[in-house]
Amino acid sequence: MERKMAERIKRLPPYLFARLDALIEEERKKGREIISLGVGDPDLPTPSYIVEEMKRRIEEESNHKYPSYVGMLEFRKAVAGWYEKRFGVQLDPENEVLTLIGSKEGIGHIPLAFVDPGDLVLIPDPGYPVYRGGTILAGGDYFTMPLKEENGFLPDLSKIPEDVRRKAKLMFINYPNNPTSGVASLEFFEEVVDFARKNEIIVCHDAAYSEITYDGYQAPSFLQIPGAKEVGVEFHSLSKTFNMTGWRIGFVVGNAQVIKALGKVKTHLDSGVFQAIQWAGIKALEKGKPEKEVIEEYRKRRDLLIEGIKKLGLSVNPPKATFYLWVKVPKRFTSEEFTLFLLKESGVVVTPGTGFGEEGEGYVRMSYTLPTQRIEEVIRRWEKIGLTL
Ligand SMILES: *Cc1c(COP(=O)(O)O)cnc(C)c1O
């Protein structure tokens, strides 16, 4: 029997990588050893002090029950403490902090709290696909804000038309940025606060990569801007900072009304984060930053991969943050063609920029969440094909 799916499912963008996945499988079958720069998932383990805390807390029977919807107060206090220490921003742990099942969960659900059919959400293009998906699932429409290299991958707010401003309920921004690795200054955040206040738009800043930074760069919080708390919230994740992608814990902070509304949606959909994980998260937040060795390892990999890109005859500026290189493809290729070319010629998988939106055309994203020996192998393979590019 043919099942008729809901309209909202039909409106979700198709899975762009299906063709790529099939071709990867084809290359594998040929006996080719594939190296993937495609996925953005830290390969390094969760630090042992976090794992040890989890082991201890898992034995406690008090943690075996349903957790509270909003998260343990101890966890929310740890978040507030971290914000104060890291950004000098004060938060009320009772009303301005909400625990999430990974930040993706909160990002995907927040449109359900604020977006009705006919409303618009401003999303960056290229951008993390969940901004678009969450908007569509809530029945809303989106307006894309192009992130151009010549603007430092920041959206040009002055280009957002008046009628769009009127219909827009939410605006997603994300710095340090996935996939472009662009970073935002406090001046830009000031501009965003001003824009949001004037147009009564709720800002959702996704700061998943705030702690993955290099060469002395420190990413600011959106909430450092006076008045930011009146217009928006900031999403954070322990996933990238502490190599905890599989644990599923994150949080959102900022405007109490916005937090309350998202919390209300969540009470109808989930029942919070396993308390043992929250205790482990508290340990992570008390430490407050990634291990120095982890950042040093990423930096080494970044520089190595840039060497590899040079072998292809291409270039990219060393990014200040994230673990991605956003690389302009040679003019005679589209993003997808170049991705297929690299796969066929070198057995290396990258992500076509168009997977992140139309503005991603002309770029590919390369992730350096793999060991240096593997990146050295990528360089060897690219040395050979650079000549034919
Ligand atoms: C990885 C990522 C997230 C989500 O991470 P969680 O594991 O769900 O906390 C959110 N935003 C961006 C841009 C990401 O790359």
Image: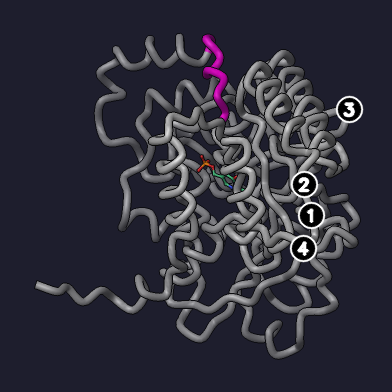
Closer mark to the observer between disc 2 and disc 4: 2
Q: Secondary structure at mark 1?
A: loop
Closer mark to the observer between disc 1 and disc 3: 1
Which residue corresponds to the image point at 51% horizontal and 26% vertical from the top-left? 281
**Residue hosting label 3:** 216
Q: Is residue 18 above or below residue 36?
A: below
Mark 3–mark 2 Cα distance, whole angstroms, equals: 35 Å
Label 3 near label 4: C-beta < 8 Å? no
**Residue hosting label 4:** 147
Closer mark to the observer between disc 4 and disc 3: 4
> Quadrant of residue 78 in the image?
top right
Instruction: Note whether ligand 1 is within 8 Å of mark 1.
Output: no
Q: Which residues are magenta?
A: 42-49
Which residue corresponds to the image point at 73% horizontal and 24% vertical from the top-left? 301
Report the amino acid beneath label 1: Pro
| Of the pair 147 and 342, the residue shown nearer to us | 342
Q: Earlier in the sequence, mark 3 or mark 2?
A: 3
Q: Secondary structure at mark 4?
A: loop
Report the amino acid beneath label 4: Leu
